[in-house]
Amino acid sequence: MKIKIIDKIFIAWMRKHGLTLLRITLAVVFIWFGALKVGSVSPVADLVMRTYPFFPEPAFLSFLGLWEIAIGLGLMFKITLRTTLALLWFQMLGTFAAAVLDPSLFFMHSNIFLLTTQGEFVVKNLVFLAASIVVGGHEVDSWI
């Protein structure tokens, strides 16, 4: 009987805090990854530049980093959330487009089920995309 009470308390706590924690942790990841790019210490810098060689190297990486920091700050402080999520989804489009532009960087032996380390890095963005949809679907009072 005590387990059911503890379970109900835990579920109530998750319902009360889960969405906020999801939004804030998503923000932290975007700020962190963006800061690494701006500071020219990102472990994916080489991947980004090999995927998008037609953009100027240091400027493009800094631009992406600032873009990600803006997304993170928008999520963290619920600043124009609709615009923030649009920026996030556009950034996600860029990461998934990378797999189309140069699949050999992301898939081993042209097999979509065998990911490289870079491929795993991109696939984890599916979780970010889903999390952003959850945030966008519930944070309706902060759209403007």
Image: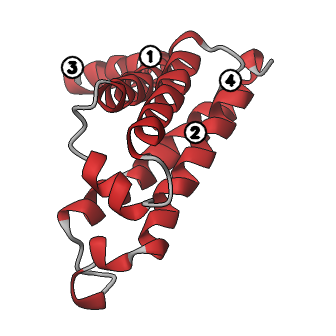
Residue plotted at (30% across, 19% down)? 5
Cα separation, mark 1 vs mark 4, equals 18 Å
Q: Position of residue 133 (x, y in %)?
A: 60, 42
Query: Under tag 4, what secondary structure?
Result: helix
**Circle 1: is it few (<14), some (14-19), or many (20+) Cα within 10 Å?**
few
| Alpha carbon distance from label 2 to label 4 | 10 Å
Which percent across, then down, holds residue 68?
Answer: 48, 31
Q: Compare marks 3 and 2 and give the one earlier in the sequence.
A: 3
What residue is at 48 percent from the left and 18 percent from the top? 20
Q: Residue furthest right?
A: 144
**N-term-proximal mark, 2 vs 1:** 1
Instruction: Say above or below: 112 vs 29.
Output: below
Q: Amino acid at mark 3?
A: Lys
Q: Which residue is mark 1?
A: 17
Kindly check if marks 4 and 3 are in contact, taking CB atoms under 8 A apart as contact: no
| SS class, disc 1 | helix
What is the spatial separation of the Cα atoms under label 4 and label 3, in whole angstroms?
41 Å
Dividing the image into 4 quarters, which one contains the N terminus? top left
Residue position marked by numbered label 4 in the rendering: 81
Quarter holding residue 65: top left
Which numbered disc covers residue 2?
3
Mark found first going from the N terminus, 4 or 3: 3
Q: Is residue 64 left or right of residue 119?
A: right
- Which kind of residue does numbered mark 1 sit on? His
Q: Which residue is mark 2?
A: 88
Q: Earlier in the sequence, mark 2 or mark 4?
A: 4
